[in-house]
Amino acid sequence: MDLKLVKENKIFCDGKNKSDGHPRIYLEVSDTKVTTCPYCSMKFKRK
Ligand SMILES: [Zn+2]
């Protein structure tokens, strides 16, 4: 499982850090729950 801790409450994911990438999408991130990218299943959480 990949979990990336970020400082921003809005980030984008393009999948490049995991595979060949996907269209860039913006995701809202909170510090109380994990946000999962629907394309690459990368998980984000605020620090
Ligand atoms: Zn992604």
Image (cartoon, helix red, strand yellow):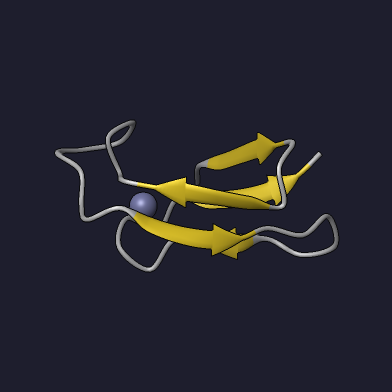
Instruction: Give the quarter of the figure containing the C terminus.
Output: top right
Q: Nearer the viewer, residue 46 or 24?
A: 24
Q: Hey, which residue is sitting farthest left in the picture? A: 20
Location of residue 6 by image quarter? top right
Check the image and report above or below for 23 versus 15.
Answer: below
Q: Residue at x 14, y 38 (%)?
A: 20
Residue 37 coordinates in the image, percent (x, y): 44, 61
Q: Residue at x 46, y 49 (%)?
A: 12
Residue 7 coordinates in the image, percent (x, y): 74, 36
- Compared across the picture, whether 32 is left or right of 12 comes to right
- Compared across the picture, whether 11 is left or right of 5 comes to left
Location of residue 5 by image quarter? top right
Check the image and report above or below for 16 versus 33.
Answer: above
Q: Residue at x 77, y 59 (%)?
A: 30
Q: Residue at x 20, y 43 (%)?
A: 21
Count of marks placed on residues: 0
Q: Nearer the viewer, residue 23 or 1?
A: 23
- Compared across the picture, whether 13 is left or right of 28 comes to left
Location of residue 4 by image quarter? top right
